[in-house]
Amino acid sequence: MALPPPAPAARPGRPVPGAALAPLLGFVVLLAAVFAVSYAAGTAAGPAAPGWHRTGGGGPGAPGGGAGDTGRMSGMDGS
């Protein structure tokens, strides 16, 4: 019985086509898994600071703020 011919050896200087695809695909899968786990953990933990929100619009002329508002408590300047 005759043996089959040996497979051609890859050249040392040339990469095998598709060889870089496996690590890239593995990295993308790992990245997606990390994002999925962090999203699930954030969803389970809930909001970072519930109840913290702006009371005013923040712009000039908006209630609760404006150009003259320095953010200090009223009545604390000695007057």
Image: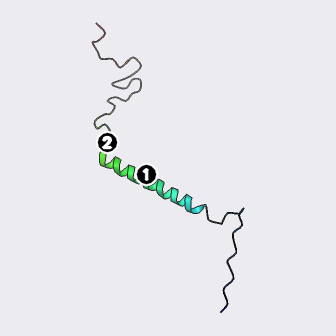
Q: Residue 13: x and y, percent?
A: 72, 62
The mark nearer the N terminus, 1 or 2, is 1
Residue 35 tag number: 1
Residue at point 39%, 27% (across, down)? 58
Please tell me which residue lies in front, 2 or 65.
2
Residue 20 tag number: none
Q: Is residue 11 left or right of residue 68?
A: right
Q: Residue 8: x and y, percent?
A: 70, 75
Q: Cα distance, mark 1 to mark 2?
A: 17 Å
SS type, badge 2: loop
* Crowd rating for badge 2 (residues with CA inside 10 Å; few <14, some 14–19, many 20+): few
Hey, what amino acid is under mark 1? Answer: Phe
Specify whether residue 68 is in view: yes
Specify whether residue 79 is in view: no
Q: Which residue is mark 2?
A: 47
SS type, badge 1: helix
Please tell me which residue lies in front, 61 or 1.
1
